[in-house]
Amino acid sequence: MGGGWMEGREGSGAAEEDEARGQKSEQSSDRGGGGGGGSGFGGAAWEVRRRHFSRKRSVDVRRINPKVPKEEAVAISGRLLQILSDHGPLTVGNTWNHAKDAGISGLNSKTHMKVLLKWMTGRRVVKLTCVHVGNAKKFLYSPYTESSEGSGSSALAEDNTASAQGGKGQRKKQAAALQ
């Protein structure tokens, strides 16, 4: 009889219960539980903010310096635009080959041409499109037109929905905007 209080615990399986409790506390600490928060709407909003502010800002293409005086940049961009309109959508490499053949004065290098194409993109003179070819992507420059933006087709679609709803005022505004 002189076993004391430990004798009773060994036989009743209390040691296994203690181990199970220890495993539970380890599991809850792995999951981040235990009163810290971080779940629910507040945690999701924090994650969205963190992702948003950790990204780099995109380059403001309207503020790109063409590296030459504006008059010369306008003249070079006119020649590049002529090449793009004559030969269709072109990659940077093909545009450079055509520009070398045309002998555009003031165009120093392929890098300078790329800066000018980006400047022209910011001024909405040319547009840059991405074409998927298998697993690769091709980026093509082409002249910018109002119909290429998709405004014409979307305006016609909105016109059809407005006529179905009987919105005569909206159709007049859209027709004036198209002209």
Image (spheres, rainbow, N blue to C red):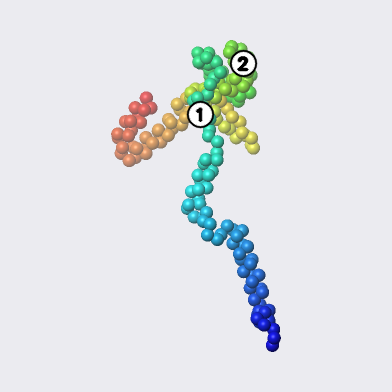
Q: Quadrant of residue 165?
A: top left
Three-letter residue code for mark 1: Asp
Image x and y of residue 122, in percent:
50, 25
Image x and y of residue 139, in percent:
59, 29
Please tell me how crowded label 1 is: few (under 14), some (14-19), or many (20+) other residues with Cα within 10 Å.
few
Numbered label attached to residue 108: 2
Residue 126, visible in the rendered structure: no
Q: Toward the viewer: 33 or 70?
A: 33
- What residue do we see at 38% from left, 36% from top? 158
- Compared to residue 121, the image places residue 17 above or below, namely below
- What residue do we see at 63% from left, 73% from top? 17
- Compared to residue 8, the image places residue 102 above or below, namely above
Residue 110, visible in the rendered structure: yes
Q: Are marks 2 and 1 in contact (CB under 8 Å)?
A: no
Q: Toward the viewer: 60 or 138?
A: 60
Please name the residue that numbered disc 1 is placed on: 60
Q: Residue furthest right?
A: 2
Distance of label 2 from label 1 (alpha carbons):
23 Å
Three-letter residue code for mark 2: Asn
Left or right: 38, with 179 as reference point: right
Residue depth check, mark 2 versus mark 1: number of the one nearer the observer:
1
Image x and y of residue 70, in percent:
50, 15
Image x and y of residue 78, in percent:
52, 16
Q: Quadrant of residue 9?
A: bottom right
